[in-house]
Amino acid sequence: MPCVLCETPSSPLLFEDARLRVILVDDEPDYPGFCRVLWKAHVREMTDLAAADRAHLFDWVLRVEAALRAELNPDKINLASLGNVVPHLHWHVIPRFADDAHFPAPVWAARQRDGVAHDVDGLAARLRARLSATE
């Protein structure tokens, strides 16, 4: 069975190195700034990685969180590593706003209201610049 995360994503690429890539998920309009940190090698769990690789991956999860906080000033950031549907190690980094469609419930819960649009013009470029400055 092919793995969609092993393929090069069509979403905007924010950062990439030999081990991981960071993308801006552009198919979640209710959640501006929704990012994924994708481990390139096809593994299922964090414990499949060597300690140095785990540290590298989680460091980038936290760099993405910091960049999103600086750019969007969300009420909360959700971090999730699920992989139930796609068993390929990746982290979701999701800015949350009190006026989003699901807050305070998870983004995968039932909608509680219509969400409010947040200004995201040029967000990919701004995040790319912030992430490149942290290298």
Image (spheres, rainbow, N blue to C red):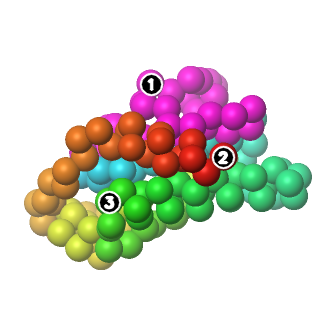
Q: What is the distance, in whole Å, between disc 3 and disc 1 at their CAs?
A: 23 Å
Q: Visible in this render: residue 84?
A: no
In the rendered image, residue 57, in percent from the top left (x then y), is placed at: 70, 52
The local crowd at label 3, few if under 14, some if 14 to 19, many if 20 or more residues have their Cα within 10 Å, is some
Residue 40 figure quarter: top right
Quick one: SS at disc 2?
Answer: loop
In the rendered image, residue 107, in percent from the top left (x then y), is placed at: 34, 61
- In depth, the one of 127 and 6 nearer the eye is 127
In the rendered image, residue 38, in percent from the top left (x then y), is placed at: 61, 42
In the rendered view, tell whether residue 80 sits above or below residue 4: below
Of badges 2 and 1, the one in the foreground is 2
Look at mark 2 in the image and give the residue it sits on: 135
- Verify CB contact (< 8 Å) between mark 3 and mark 2: no
Mark closer to the chain start, 2 or 1: 1
Point out the stretch of residues depicted in magenta: 1-29
Left or right, 116 with respect to 92, comes to left
In the rendered view, tell whether residue 110 sits above or below residue 4: below
Of badges 3 and 2, the one in the foreground is 2
Residue 124 figure quarter: top left
- Tell me which residue sits at (20%, 62%) in the image: 101
Mark closer to the chain start, 3 or 1: 1
User: The disc labelled 2 sits on which kind of residue?
Assistant: Glu
- Verify CB contact (< 8 Å) between mark 2 and mark 1: no
Q: Would residue 106 be counted in the magenta stretch?
A: no
The local crowd at label 1, few if under 14, some if 14 to 19, many if 20 or more residues have their Cα within 10 Å, is few
**Disc marking residue 10:** 1
**Disc marking residue 72:** 3
Quarter holding the N terminus? top right
- In depth, the one of 64 and 109 nearer the eye is 64
The local crowd at label 2, few if under 14, some if 14 to 19, many if 20 or more residues have their Cα within 10 Å, is few
Q: What is the distance, in whole Å, between disc 3 and disc 2 at their CAs?
A: 21 Å
Left or right, 10 with respect to 30, comes to right
